[in-house]
Amino acid sequence: MNFTDITVARTIPAPAEKIFDVWIDPKSPGGPWFGAERVILNPVVDGLFYFAFKHEGRIWPHYGRFTKMDRPRLLEHTWMSEATKGAESIVTITLEPRGEQTGVTLRHSGVPDDELGLQHKEGWTWILSALADALASRRSATGQT
């Protein structure tokens, strides 16, 4: 089986600390775990996670382990799912402050180079958009600039 890397990037109108905190909190709208059917999350180095979300009428389970956490600059965790054929892939989220905004780069390494594996790009793009939208609506709701 061949593997590839996927990279998605987005500038989000929020401080890196806020983005980091939302990413590791399953109760925060916009985070990758929010809205899942089931979440078990221990966001510490060597902490495990399991989450399952419903898509196209079925449940998709995901598993992993946090490998690096350097608030607010870096998060890294493994990622295993049906779409990775059970292989352990690596997700690295880099946060780069840019004034009032943060550049977020997500790199998913070791993804199977097939249709299901490559769909991770669409999924991660959707998650970064949901994160940006949730943080932008929080800022406008609280009157922050």
Image (spheres, rainbow, N blue to C red):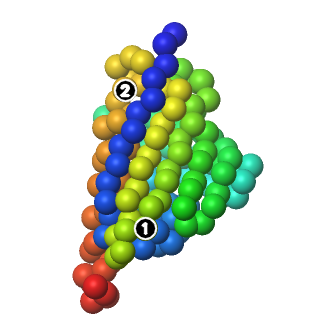
Q: Residue 127 appears at what percent x and percent y?
A: 36, 51
When the figure is inspected, residue 23 is found, relative to residue 17, above or below; the finding is above
Amino acid type shown at disc 2: Leu
Image quarter where the C terminus lies is bottom left
Instruction: Please rate how many residues cluster around mark 1, counting C-alpha atoms within 10 Å: few if below 14, some from 14 to 19, many from 20.
Output: some
Q: Residue 80 appears at what percent x and percent y?
A: 57, 33
Q: Can the viewer see residue 60?
A: yes
Q: Quadrant of residue 117?
A: top left
Q: Give the camera-side residue of 34 and 37.
A: 34
Q: Residue 28 appears at what percent x and percent y?
A: 45, 67
Q: Give the camera-side residue of 49 and 6.
A: 6
Q: Which residue is mark 1?
A: 97
User: Considering only order in the chain, which callout, 1 or 2, is on the residue closer to the N terminus?
Assistant: 1
| Circle count | 2
Q: Residue 105 appears at what percent x and percent y?
A: 42, 50
When the figure is inspected, residue 108 is found, relative to residue 9, above or below; the finding is above
Is 125 on the left-hand or right-hand side of 19? left
Nearest to the eye among marks 2 and 1: give it: 1
- Give the number of the disc on residue 118: 2
Q: Quadrant of residue 125?
A: top left
Q: Say which residue appears at 60% left-offset and 45% top-offset.
A: 77
Amino acid type shown at disc 1: Pro
Of all residues, the one furthest to the right in this rendering is: 46
Q: Give the camera-side residue of 133 and 56.
A: 133
Kindly state the secondary structure of the residue where label 2 is placed: helix
Kindly state the secondary structure of the residue where label 1 is placed: strand
Instruction: Please rate how many residues cluster around mark 2, counting C-alpha atoms within 10 Å: few if below 14, some from 14 to 19, many from 20.
Output: some
Q: Say which residue appears at 63% left-offset and 61% top-offset.
A: 70
Of all residues, the one furthest to the top in this rendering is: 1
Q: Quadrant of residue 140?
A: bottom left
- Give the number of the disc on residue 12: none
